[in-house]
Image (cartoon, rainbow, N blue to C red):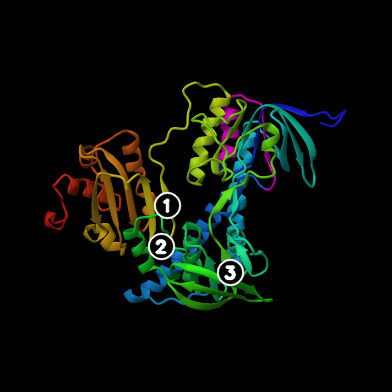
Amino acid sequence: MVMGEVAKEYELAIIGGGPGGYMAAIRAGQLGISTVLIEKEEVGGTCLNRGCIPSKMLLHISESVKEMKLLQHAGIIAKIDIDAKKIRKKNLDVVRRLRDGVKLLLKSYNIDVMKGEARLESRNFARISGKKVNESVRFGKCIIATGSIPRIPKGVKTGNNIITSREALFLKDIPKRIAILGAGYIAAELGTYFSEMGSEVHLLARSRLLSRIDGDAVSIVQKESFFKVHEQTIIASINKSRNRVQIEFLSSGKRIKLDADKLIIAMGRIPNTKGIGLENAGVNVDEQGYIKVDEKMQTNMPNIYAIGDVVKGPMLAHKAFMQGRAAAEAVADIKSSAYDVNAMPAAVFTHPEIAVVGDIKNSKNVVKFPFSALGKAVATGSKGFIKIGYDNDGRITGATAVGKNASELLGELGLAIEMNAFLEDIEGTVHTHPTMYESIHEAAALALGKPMHYLQKFH
């Protein structure tokens, strides 16, 4: 601290205004804690501004385009004109509207928001610098919520026609040919959008598409998608000219040269913990850069907490929401509060979507119910299935679904896992007919040996 400098004082400083950070701030405000939220760009973080939200808006549009094309088989012919600039403007408007909503919530709970880059100088002091700010903050407690950044391979420099998802979501045109380096959920969603909008899209997978997800589900997505996946890929070279990118790679031992308008780097994300002064505050990180925390989200320094992508676990906004709330309540010394989740849900918003919850991989038993036996799915042309994992006594342990709007299906099963519910609880609950979520009831009935719309001999 500079001699004569007057630091603003707060009970709680939150560094990072993404889903975890702003949720922690809102909960802290509800609990009457004087709080400052420090964000170097815009509140909402990557998810709201450059990730979850803008990508879903684009995928909504591309799904409509895809369905209009498929309706030609039902006798409905439509001419489709795409204006990428208008789509971009609409996307920015959606982001701005939701961001303004978050700002209003923060203001309503008397949260001070500082726009600048924070660096810890000690365990109770941080300096904030930026274009319009050069201030210091003294705090009793601190929550680190700085999120994650794209993983960029060594030797690759982004810019112009080599971009990340951040730039890809707001392009002013639809490139004719796109290569995507990666095959996880970000790559799959970007591949879905651009291929449905008319781009020729190539995903370069180190192993296979969505390698951490049920292969049966992924095979349906791959069959229904317009993009091409190159498996077992090893990159030999990446060269860029003014308007093009040339990628040479091996795929399953075959050498391929690909010329593209854009190369999108989508190889996952890493915790954003460098350069924020953790060492000055004595906060421990592991060899991968993750901050170590307990169930209260507390680090090795009793007054410093960490949440979201900077701690181990899936990099999901809803995980950060729950951790942000838990951390704020820990700051308020609410003894019963802790981050204790048994059924973390996740979804991949391809077309069709994939959704998972719980731990189906290690479930003792798994039942699979195909959507080909579900009235609503047949009527709407939704291909896919639902799998439910369960113990020998029938307790539900996990689930996977693939199909149209699969991301909306598994809330019931997430609650079932958290409540230690059994197959009988699901089967004994009336489900609306005809619906997609009725498949959950059908799967439970099948597992119990009393299927309603499926022949037992095929189980």
Q: Secondary structure at mark 1?
A: strand
The kind of residue on which mark 1 rests is: Ala
Which of label 3 and label 1 is nearer to you?
A: 3
Q: Position of residue 141 (x, y in %)?
A: 64, 27
Which of label 2 and label 3 is nearer to you?
A: 3
Give the residue pinned by disc 3: 263
Label 3 crowd bin: few (<14), some (14–19), many (20+), radius 10 Å: many
Q: Tell me the distance, in whole angstroms, between the alpha carbons under discs 2 and 3.
A: 22 Å
Q: Say the numbered circle drawn on residue 229.
A: none
The kind of residue on which mark 2 rests is: His
- Tell me if residue 423 comes above or below residue 71 in the rendering: above
Label 2 crowd bin: few (<14), some (14–19), many (20+), radius 10 Å: many
Q: Which residues are magenta?
A: 20-41
Residue found farthest to the left: 457
Give the residue pinned by disc 2: 351
Give the residue pinned by disc 1: 347
Q: Is residue 342 in sight in this rendering? A: yes
Q: Position of residue 434 (x, y in %)?
A: 26, 53
Query: In the rendered view, does 176 fall on the left or right side of 210?
Result: right
Q: Secondary structure at mark 3?
A: strand
Q: Are marks 1 and 2 in contact (CB under 8 Å)?
A: no
Q: Tell me the distance, in whole angstroms, between the alpha carbons under discs 3 and 1.
A: 25 Å
The kind of residue on which mark 3 rests is: Leu
Of mark 3 and mark 1, the one earlier in the sequence is: 3
Residue plotted at (45% across, 70% down): 230
Residue 105 belongs to the span the image colors magenta: no
Q: State the image quarter where residue 351 is shown.
A: bottom left
Residue 27 belongs to the span the image colors magenta: yes
